[in-house]
Amino acid sequence: MGNQKLDQLKKEYMDTPIPQELDFLVRKTLKENGVYSIPNKKAFRRLGAIAASIAIVFGIFIVEINSSPAFAKSMSEVPVVGNLVKVLTFREYTVKDEGCDAEIKVPQVQGLKDKKLENSINEKYLKEGKELYQGFTADMEELKKNGGGHMGISSGYEVKTDTDRILSIGRYTVNTVGSSSTQMKYDTIDKKKQVLLTLPSLFKDDQYIKVISDNIKKQMREQMKKDKDVTYWLDDPEIDPSEQFNQIKKDQSFYINKDGKLIISFDKYDVAPGCMGVVEFTIPTDVLSNILVGNEYIH
């Protein structure tokens, strides 16, 4: 996708209005704190139910790149990938008030030679942030009408792998409403070939689904045998078979670590109780060697 579409997404992102009743409060807060960026409401995932009975007032501000001394300092500490490619925070949303706590950081990749690839990745990140924002907007409007409650969201990113060949960026979203849920998404880029890797692209055919799934089940059983506090939804007669882990998805979340190993990731509650959080499995390369397309990424 071209620069024109990316610029349009940025414009839409910046131009989204906030309710008039919040405008004075937001601008006053910004002025008092020496921040003069455009105010918007914060993004938040749509809630399944609305809590009841106290009205809430919330202050929201947007911190843009270099818009305040503190944020400018954070920009000097962004992770640098190789000598040319870097990952930085394009937008940061913060909400801190009674019953409402949100922090959303939207990453941006800079320095890829393939600008079509770079723009498509950044457009995806902007879209994700906008969807969080729209969900939050709707939920806060409902909350104002029906009362208050406690909710929170934390969304950000980290560079998982930074080598001469591989850039893996992990993006997390933690939603808190009573209990919490955590989602992880990854992008793994071949910096030399300037391509975005997918799980199917690493293998000769769909046989990888069964091979990887069988190895993960083996690891699950070994872990549960060694530690009674480790639990996976596998081989449990008290759990419906349809709810137990059977196999990975064709496009299961993954990344490649600095040692060239394939890491398969599951979100909180996907394959285990919430106390296990996000779980990852390192797949031994010898298990995959016969079905890999090549060994340039996984070795």
Image (spheres, helix red, strand yellow):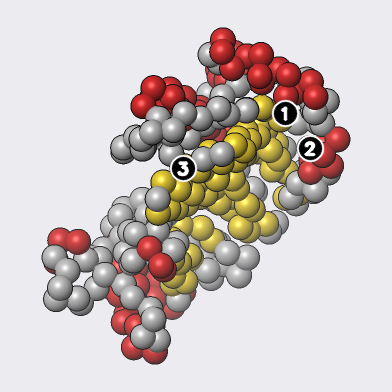
Sooner in the amino-acid sequence: mark 1 or mark 2: 1
Residue wearing tag 2: 71
Alpha carbon separation for disc pair 3 and 1: 27 Å
Q: Are marks 1 and 2 in contact (CB under 8 Å)?
A: yes
Look at mark 3 in the image and give the residue it sits on.
Answer: 150
Q: Is residue 90 left or right of residue 297?
A: right
Q: Which residue is disc 1 drawn over?
A: 64
Which one is closest to the eye, mark 2 or mark 3? 3
Camera-side mark, 3 or 1: 3
* Left or right: residue 32 compared with residue 182: right
Q: Secondary structure beneath disc 2?
A: helix
Instruction: Give the vertical position of 69 relative to 284 (above or below).
Output: above
- Mark 2, Cα crowd under 10 Å, few <14 / some 14-19 / many 20+, is some
Q: Is residue 134 visible?
A: no
* Residue positioned most to the top: 20
Image spot of residue 214 (x, y percent): 28, 73
The three-letter amino acid code for the residue at tag 1 is Glu
Please report the residue visible at 56 percent of the width from the left and 39 percent of the height from the top: 98
> What residue appears at the point 60 percent right and 48 percent down from the top-left corner?
157
